Amino acid sequence: MGDTSAVVVGGGIGGLAAAIGLRLIGWDVTVLERAAALADAGAGISLHANGLRALDALGVGAAVRAAARPQYTGGTRTPTGRRLARMDGAALERELGTPIGGIPRAVLHRLLREALPAECLLVGAEATSAGQPARDRVTVTTRDKVLDANLVVAADGVNSRLRARLFPHHPGPAYSGSTVLRAITERPVDLADDFSLTWGRGAEFGHIAFTDGRAEWHAVLTSPPGIRHAAPLHALRRRFEGWHDPIPALLDATRPEAVLHHDMYELATPLPAFVSGRIALLGDAAHAMTPNLGQGACQALEDAVTLTAALATEPAVDAALARYDAERRPRSQSVARAARRAGRLGQQLAHPAAVALGNTAMRLAPSGATLRAVLRHAAWTPPVFGRPLTGCE
């Protein structure tokens, strides 16, 4: 590898975006993905304006927008269907220049991979360690090779091994108190809204509509970690019995084997730095957050663009990494705190009086307050690092 070489550990959204950005500014990049095969498992994602703008900066925004369904209608309801808040997607578009987009994660992953040469991505290659033998060099070790580079981007997720090595005294990810079951329907479903959330006692059910008529749904439950169901769809039908349409239809349109179940972990203790030597943490490895604001992937995309811009404009890699840390850590950790608060004020409420009070507050809040809440996190402008391209040149 040359003097501007990087190893990206992790082939998820943040890692692929970082690789695209680094390639755009002339770096030689290798992405290590520990999965033995790219199964593209996952449900759906809502991309807010900040995430879409980051993708625009990387040259893949147009392709993603074409595959995403704009979210103009939706909001929050009670289990009976009573509306608590309405989402005004058109107003968001006027303010931010783009609507929120709903897209299957597998499609987003594919579009990001297509922006990279196939030889950039090494599948089934797990980074077992990383070290810095010299001030300007980093080595990454896998089971069968040692890679030498000027920079390592640790985008290896909430359970990041590299983060644990860099910050051995950090407590690591903490259980958020919630578990999530989710899936994409097998067939189209008749939906009145592009996006919706329903809040009940200790539970949330939501959906994202896709361009082909199918939808992603998720059920977030306040629960101890580690609980699994032999028949998850049956368990969900019991848990959400009597909840308003289209919740029963979404469950009925889902194959049992399509349901994913994950306990939700976050970095409740913020990291003291996103950088250690020539290793930069990115995405969930740096700031894993609860999904209550729909900002997890968007923040990873912001990370990728900010890191790219810093490396493109700073005179030295060390200075670029210091700038990346200074710009990204305060913002992403602030968003993570806001996401945690949103969960505590929504789905995690369990006492009937607390639920009633929260519902009343949401119902009486002026529509402008809801708009401002979204704008607070989505109104982000990417730093400039050059002409956005349509692929890796």
Image (tube, rainbow, N blue to C red):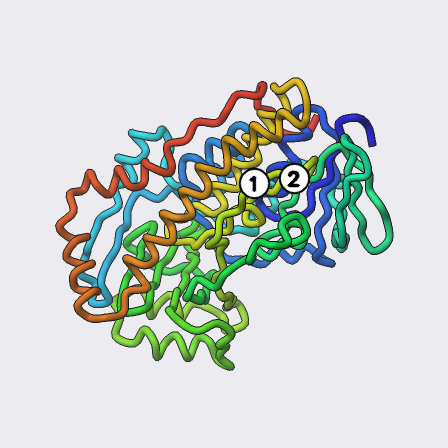
Of residues 315 and 363, which is closer to you in this image? Answer: 315
Q: Position of residue 341 (x, y in %)?
A: 33, 53
Check contact, mark 2 vs mark 1: CB within 8 A: yes
Residue 392 in which image quadrant: top right
Q: Residue at x 32, y 40 (%)?
A: 374
Specify the quadrant that holds the N terminus.
Answer: top right
Of residues 240 and 251, which is closer to you in this image? Answer: 240
Could you say whether the residue bearing mark 2 is in a helix, strand or loop? strand
Q: Is residue 271 visible?
A: yes
Q: Residue at x 74, y 58 (%)?
A: 36
Disc 2 residue type?
Answer: Ser
Of residues 36 and 157, which is closer to you in this image? Answer: 157
Q: Residue at x 26, y 45 (%)?
A: 87
How many marks the image carries: the answer is 2
Relative placement, left or right, of 62 versus 197 is: right
Q: Position of residue 339 (x, y in %)?
A: 38, 50
Disc 1 residue type?
Answer: Ala
Q: Residues within 10 Å of mark 2 (few under 14, many from 20)?
A: some
Name the residue carrying label 1.
273
Q: Position of residue 24 (x, y in %)?
A: 65, 26
Q: Residue 276 — which label? A: 2
